[in-house]
């Protein structure tokens, strides 16, 4: 390890990140890296349809090839092993493993068996997400998440996968970021399936969470040795001024981004303020649904990226007003590590049943270039170190955080932003599929090596 980087990512000496049982990992998702869109019986997903619709994704990019991880996973896992991490978070592509009649596709399932077996051989903990947004298109054709039946189809899929992969998984996550599926997919139209109706978003959320709740007991029954949880993205807000209206606006932002998902899961009800924000959008809820949704979790996955500054819109909502002069990433997102600390502390205060937490995603995009074989992503190193320390502070304040996954192992297909936004620890040249570990990957490897040395002394 060349010296300028050696200690650049080390968190503070008393940080929980140094503890041997604190899980440090990297994360990816199927549609963003696998490619091989038509291989071995894979069916189209809503993201194939959406990304192939002109004007939906920046530069007309799609996930047909992506990082070609479906064919290159072995060398990608060699790169992963060089990082010295404890865990890896991946997702399963639903349209690879089941056909439109709900029958298993053995070729697709075997792919994930091979991945999980290799990870286990490499000594890595395996966090598996069932739904990272790639809904089979045939289910969208029947109404997608607006159709209550999709929740039951999801439970069947979870049942099949946990029977097939039982014993190979450390922790299951039912859904990744239902907020994004519902809000970006059904209200804003910025993600697949591209619908634009606020009421749809609330109904889609209800069916997503119902699917989650139906899947939980099946996962537990079929794979009793694994943890069962869900992954939520959370947002931090700041009020533009100290006025009561702006402070209320900031609260409502967090209700919409956090409580809308966490309240049903952890309290068994939707927050009333959600319907103050969006009157007349109450979803259709059948008797017993909320109890299903609130089934006990072994852990909660938290994805955190940035803070949003908001002001009152003069009615009952909020408007985002970007703060000038703050540090931002290639996404334009504000770098604000203390937001993660404060949210975690707030969740512990607000949810008596809060389970142990894993930070399942955190990271940043930068316009990374390979120069003489080197990718100098100094901002990412500093970003990660500051977020490690913010999480450590929450742990010192009593929040039970068990692990942290960097988003992402590889540069990949960043949804509506295509390949232009680079989140990886490893740079991908999409023309050649050549991989170059960035300086952040070297710095992370230096930290994991130092941690191992310290913990074996
Ligand atoms: C999250 C997604 C993940 C990735 C990051 C940047 O919302 O879960 O797939 O795109 O954002």
Image (cartoon, grey):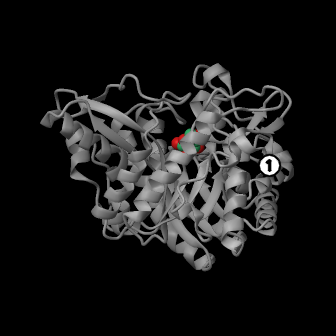
- Total numbered labels: 1
Q: Position of residue 449 (x, y in %)?
A: 73, 59
Residue at image location 66% in from the left, 71% down from the top: 455
Is residue 441 visible to the viewer in this orientation of the structure? no
Q: Position of residue 143 (x, y in %)?
A: 50, 43
Residue at image location 33% in from the left, 61% down from the top: 286
To which quarter of the image does residue 59 belong?
A: top right
Label 1 Cα neighbours within 10 Å, binned few <14 / some 14-19 / many ≥20: some
Q: Is residue 95 left or right of residue 200?
A: right
To which quarter of the image does residue 436 belong?
A: top right
Foreground pick, 59 / 361: 361
Q: Is residue 374 left or right of residue 30?
A: right
Q: Is residue 382 above or below residue 61?
A: below
Secondary structure state at the residue bearing disc 1: helix
| Residue for badge 1 | 41
Q: Position of residue 171 (x, y in %)?
A: 60, 67
To which quarter of the image does residue 13 belong?
A: bottom right
In terms of image quarters, where does ligand 1 lie? top right
Q: Is residue 160 left or right of residue 402?
A: right
Foreground pick, 431 / 264: 431
Is residue 327 visible to the viewer in this orientation of the structure? yes
Q: Position of residue 341 (x, y in %)?
A: 40, 52
Foreground pick, 54 / 31: 31
């Amino acid at each position: 390890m060349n010296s300028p980087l050696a200690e650049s990512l080390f968190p503070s000496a008393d940080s929980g990140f140094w503890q041997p049982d604190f899980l440090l990992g990297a994360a990816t998702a199927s549609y963003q890296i696998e490619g091989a869109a038509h291989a071995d019986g894979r069916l189209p997903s809503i993201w194939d349809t959406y990304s192939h619709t002109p004007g939906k994704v920046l530069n007309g990019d799609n996930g047909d090839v992506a990082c070609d991880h479906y064919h290159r996973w072995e060398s990608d896992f060699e790169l992963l092993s060089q990082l010295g991490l404890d865990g890896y978070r991946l997702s399963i592509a639903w349209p690879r493993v089941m056909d439109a009649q709900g029958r298993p596709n053995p070729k697709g399932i075997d792919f994930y068996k091979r991945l999980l077996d290799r990870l286990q051989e490499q000594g890595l903990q395996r966090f598996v997400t069932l739904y990272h947004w790639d809904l089979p298109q045939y289910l969208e054709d029947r109404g997608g998440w607006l159709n209550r039946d999709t929740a039951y189809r999801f439970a069947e899929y979870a049942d099949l996968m946990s029977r097939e992969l039982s014993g190979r998984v450390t922790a299951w996550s039912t859904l990744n970021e239902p907020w994004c599926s519902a809000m970006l997919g059904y209200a804003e139209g910025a993600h697949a399936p591209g619908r634009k109706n606020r009421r749809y978003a609330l109904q889609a959320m209800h069916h997503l969470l119902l699917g989650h709740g139906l899947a939980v007991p099946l996962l537990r029954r079929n794979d009793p040795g694994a943890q069962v949880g869900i992954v939520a993205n959370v947002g931090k807000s700041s009020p533009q001024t100290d006025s009561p209206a702006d402070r209320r606006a900031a609260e409502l932002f967090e209700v919409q981004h956090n409580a809308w998902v966490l309240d049903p899961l952890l309290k068994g009800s939707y927050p009333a303020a959600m319907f103050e924000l969006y009157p007349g959008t109450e979803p259709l809820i059948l008797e017993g649904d909320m109890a299903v949704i609130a089934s006990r979790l072994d852990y909660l996955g938290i994805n955190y990226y940035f803070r949003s500054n908001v002001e009152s819109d003069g009615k009952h909502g909020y408007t985002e007003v970007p703060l000038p002069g703050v540090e931002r990433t290639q996404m334009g997102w504000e770098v604000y590590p203390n937001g993660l600390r404060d949210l975690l502390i707030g969740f512990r205060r607000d949810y008596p049943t809060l389970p142990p937490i894993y930070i399942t995603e955190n990271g940043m995009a930068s316009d990374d270039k390979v120069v003489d074989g080197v990718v100098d992503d100094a901002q990412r190193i500093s970003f990660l170190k500051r977020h490690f320390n913010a999480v450590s502070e929450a742990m010192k304040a009593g929040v039970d955080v068990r692990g942290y996954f960097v988003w992402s192992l590889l540069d990949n297909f960043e949804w509506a932003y295509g390949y232009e936004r680079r989140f990886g620890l490893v740079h991908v040249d999409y023309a050649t599929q050549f991989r170059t570990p960035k300086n952040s990957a070297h710095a992370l490897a230096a930290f994991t090596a130092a941690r191992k040395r310290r913990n074996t002394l």
